Image (tube, rainbow, N blue to C red):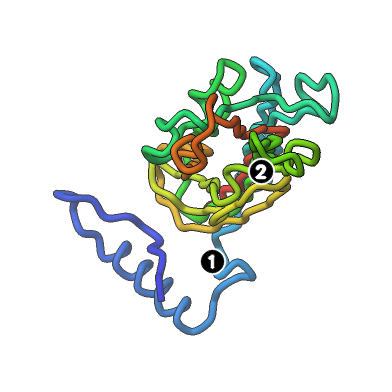
């Protein structure tokens, strides 16, 4: 069980009997059940907790940013969705990435480096000791390429060409990183249209926090596997992305 002291002690400070007695009484009270509904000391709620919250919002480079600062909780969000920010057509992706580029297989890729429209797509704030609860949403399509295969000298195939699908075994993963540490991920997403919401929860100290969405694609050389030229085209289309987090303060 974690206990909270009434009076803090610092190095080289004079030890006062009153401080020792106050801390002892508080700790004994906590062990005896003197905690509120948030598992905090009953005297943790004071007049300062009733100060009205402050909030700001803005759209910077087509990224919606929200910040809501309260006394016990703070909320932060970034969003870029094709039906809200920079929305032209719900069926048109905001970003189109060619997955045949083998550099995408080298590891986690920063979404902020895909294009200038996603440069501001991260959450950065000074967290208070407590917890972080939130969710990240991603709406995307991992596409595949389909071409007609004709075989010379075979009249049946020439008249009725077959359809060959490439990159069916390629997959994409999405992950949320807190200060470059992976805290939530989607797992493998094979070719299809996906709309995913992944929650997360972790404890945090009083420290700077940066939340950033990254993606990873594992692909294979379709040109060598099937022997066709030019290389079949496979793409990752992003329709929307969102990150929100609540910092519950201790």
Q: Is residue 28 left or right of residue 67?
A: left
Q: Is residue 223 left or right of residue 21?
A: right
Displayed quadrant of residue 103: top left
Is 82 positioned to the left or the right of 149 in the image?
right
Q: Is residue 121 above or below residue 171?
A: above
Cβ–Cβ below 8 Å for labels 2 and 1?
A: no
Name the residue beneath numbered marker 1: 40
Point 54% across, 56% down: residue: 187
The answer to whether any part of residue 209 appears in the image is no
Name which residue lies at 67% across and 45% down: 137
Cα distance between the residues tagged 2 and 1: 62 Å
Q: Residue furthest bottom?
A: 32
- State which tag comes first along the sequence, 2 or 1: 1
Q: Disc 1 on helix, strand or loop?
A: loop
Residue 200: give x, y in percent of width and height.
Answer: 56, 56
- Seen as rendered, the residue at the extreme left is 12
Nearer to us in this view, 121 or 193: 193
Looking at this view, is 159 or 87 the one in front? 159
Q: Where's residue 242, x and y in %?
A: 67, 38
- State whether residue 20 is above or below residue 138: below
Label 2 residue SS: strand
The image quarter in which residue 138 lies: top right
Q: Which residue is mark 2?
A: 164
Name which residue lies at 45% across and 39% down: 221
Residue shown at 40% from the left, 50% from the top? 205
């Amino acid at each position: 069980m974690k206990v909270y002291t009434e009076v803090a002690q610092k190095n080289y400070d004079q030890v006062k009997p009153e401080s020792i007695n106050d801390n002892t009484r508080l700790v004994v009270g906590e062990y005896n059940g003197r905690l509120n509904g948030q598992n905090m000391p009953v005297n943790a709620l004071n007049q300062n907790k009733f100060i009205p919250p402050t909030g700001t919002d803005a759209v910077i480079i087509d990224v919606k940013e929200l910040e809501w600062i309260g006394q016990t909780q703070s909320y932060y969000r970034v969003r870029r969705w094709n039906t809200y920010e920079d929305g032209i057509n719900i069926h048109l992706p905001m970003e189109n990435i060619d997955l045949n580029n083998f550099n995408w297989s080298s590891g986690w890729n920063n979404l902020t480096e895909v294009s200038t429209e996603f440069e501001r797509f991260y959450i950065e704030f000074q967290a208070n000791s407590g917890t972080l609860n939130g969710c990240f949403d991603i709406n995307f399509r991992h596409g595949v390429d389909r071409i007609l295969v004709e075989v010379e000298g075979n009249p049946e195939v020439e008249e009725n060409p077959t359809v060959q699908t490439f990159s069916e075994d390629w997959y994409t993963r999405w992950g949320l990183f807190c200060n470059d540490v992976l805290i939530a991920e989607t797992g493998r997403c094979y070719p299809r249209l996906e709309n995913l919401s992944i929650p997360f929860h972790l404890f945090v100290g009083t420290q700077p926090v940066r939340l950033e969405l990254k993606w990873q694609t594992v692909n294979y050389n379709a040109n060598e596997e099937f022997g066709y030229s030019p290389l079949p085209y496979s793409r990752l289309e992003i329709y929307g992305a969102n990150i929100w987090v609540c910092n519950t303060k201790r």
